[in-house]
Amino acid sequence: MLERLFGRGNSGDGCFEVRDKLGGVHRVPHVVLTLRAGITREEAVAAIAPFDKYRNMGRAFVNDDNWPIRFFCGSGIVESIDFSPFIGPEANVDGIFSGQAIEEALRRRPDAAVFPHPLSEKYGVTRYLTRVDADVADEIGFTAKDGKVAAFARYPRGHARKMAEGRQRAQAREDKIVAQREEAERRRAMADPAERLLSWAKVAEYWGVQDGRFTWYADRLIAATPDEWHDAASTWNWDYGREPLRWIISQPNCDTATVKKVFEGLAASFGPEFASDPAEAEGNYREDYELIHAIIARWQAGFWTRSALAYESESDPEPQRDDETAIETAFRELEASQPGRTVPYGCFLAGTPHVHAFS
């Protein structure tokens, strides 16, 4: 408990005096110092309830006076208690306190080991982790900067293991992202649209799981009619990628209304002034720029000749100008409404086992 670590107070009346980052002195009632790792969130809230200066900030509780102690809750349990550099040397955890020379801290805690953290190098700090007394068996973390202890925290048992597991999961996610980008580059080199679509479908995931549904979707798309392509483009969840849309607009018999529907989704945040070299686009925007360029180039070349379906523009395009560029003309035409038949909503997946499988 903090009570055990701090004693009964240093001001003579059961309160603690601690400094904030501006040098101001705050008198902290003793009840606040009964916080400890492992108590429930309700117990922690009850401990600080009499002090209306505290506010709930999600997982952290902190007050408006730059109060230098915070506690974090997860699954209803206090996971850790952090002590900022502003708390002053009068507060310590098992002999570790802010401003202490790191050599002295390591002498006091010879079992302390460097605790790797991805932000350590960025901020020029070294983090250490050690154990509290055997009867408590919590863990202490402290951060060294410029040869001194800059901040410290108290964690429940198993914190180091959980943090290591978290880093492993983060690294696995990063490795997965790199692999997905490499796979996207390989697909980018494929000249056959169907080969590219099927290659994507084999590795595409639905909420992190590869279950074959996108392979089924790709096969269904290749076998569908232009009317069904229009419904597929209108109902496709863009969170799953762009490849089905890319394949649809690569078909010469794709309806111009379908092309406009895809372009509508791509151009919502772009305009003619953004149509630069797709290779210069950053991150996920590159694929969108590539599709925009492909649509504009094919539109200008008259690649699509089928215009049987209706398209209702979400906004009125700008009127034609005498000095507009070829790209501006393409944007204006692609954003214009056109008359035609309507396609029944949901017809692409209607009657299939996967009618609700791609929401």
Image: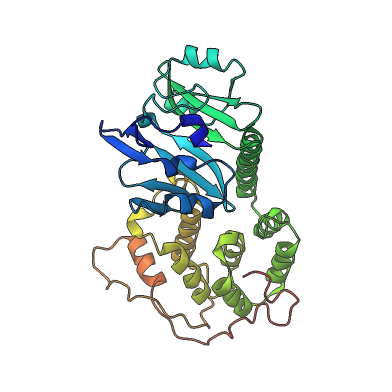
At 27% from the left edge and 63% from the top edge, which residue is drawn?
324
At 35% from the left edge and 59% from the top edge, which residue is drawn?
272
Vertical relation: 16 (above or below) 331: above
Vertical relation: 328 (above or below) 28: below
Using the rendered view, name the quadrant where residue 111 is placed. Answer: top right
Q: Which sits in the foreground, 10 or 327?
A: 10
Residue found farthest to the front: 13
Q: Which sits in the foreground, 257 or 16?
A: 16
Residue 221 appears at what percent x and percent y? 68, 70
Residue 163 appears at what percent x and percent y? 61, 36
| Residue 254 visible somewhere in the drawing | no
Residue 160 appears at what percent x and percent y? 63, 33
Q: Which sits in the foreground, 99 or 345?
A: 99
Residue 19 appears at what percent x and percent y? 31, 32
Q: Which sits in the foreground, 143 or 10?
A: 10
Vertical relation: 71 (above or below) 136: below
Using the rendered view, name the quadrant where residue 65 is placed. Answer: top left
Vertical relation: 165 (above or below) 197: above
